[in-house]
Image (cartoon, rainbow, N blue to C red):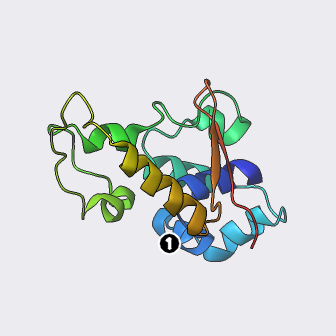
Amino acid sequence: MKERLLQLLDLEHLTPSKFADLIGVQRSSVSHILSDRNKPSFDFLQKTLKTFPGLKAEWLMLGDGPMYDQMGRESADLFNQDAPAATEHESHETQDLQQPTTLPLEPPAVEVQDIQDIEEDLITKPRKVVQVMLLYDDDTFFSYKPSE
C-alpha cells in the first residue's frame, strides 16, 4: 500500500501533507502509513477514492489492474472543449493553460545550418537528467528522479 500511495502522490504532484489536507485526514495518518507504522483505515481509503475520481479501488488496495480507469485522463481533457470542469485537485494544475492552437500537418523545413546550430547548443550547454518515466502497456508507470 505504501508504494501505491507514493505513486499516487508522485503522479498528482502532492506532498504527503497536502494529500492529507486534500482528502481530509490528519497529516500524521499519512505519515504513519508511509512509514509502515499503520495500515490505512477503511475511512482513509474511502476518502482517497472519493477525492480522486477514476482511481481504481482494486489498484489502491490490492495493486491489481490499472491505477486509473483511463490513464492520461488529464491530458485528454485539456484538448476537449466539452470536458467537464476540473476537479478540485486538478484545477490548480490547469488554470493557467490556454486553448490549444491548430498546428500544420507537416513540420516546417529545417535548414542544415539550423541543425548544426542545434547540435552546437546541445554540446556547449550543459544539461542534466531530472526525471525518467517508463510507461507500460497495462497503464502503469515507474518514475525515477536521480539524486543530486
Choose top left, top right, bottom left or bottom right for residue 26.
Answer: bottom right
In x, y percent, where is residue 36?
Answer: 84, 61
- Badge 1 amino acid: Asp
Q: Closest to the observer: 97 or 48?
A: 97
The residue pinned by badge 1 equals: 21
In x, y percent, where is residue 68?
Answer: 51, 36
Q: Closest to the observer: 68 or 71?
A: 71
Q: Can residue 61 be seen from the camera position used here?
A: yes
Residue at left 19%, top 37%? Answer: 103
Quarter placement of the C terminus: bottom right
Residue 118 in the image: above or below residue 95: above
The residue furthest right is 37
Residue at left 61%, top 24%? Answer: 137
Residue at left 36%, top 56%? Answer: 90
Q: Is residue 46 left or right of residue 35?
A: left
Residue 73 in the image: above or below residue 9: above
Q: Secondary structure at mark 1?
A: helix
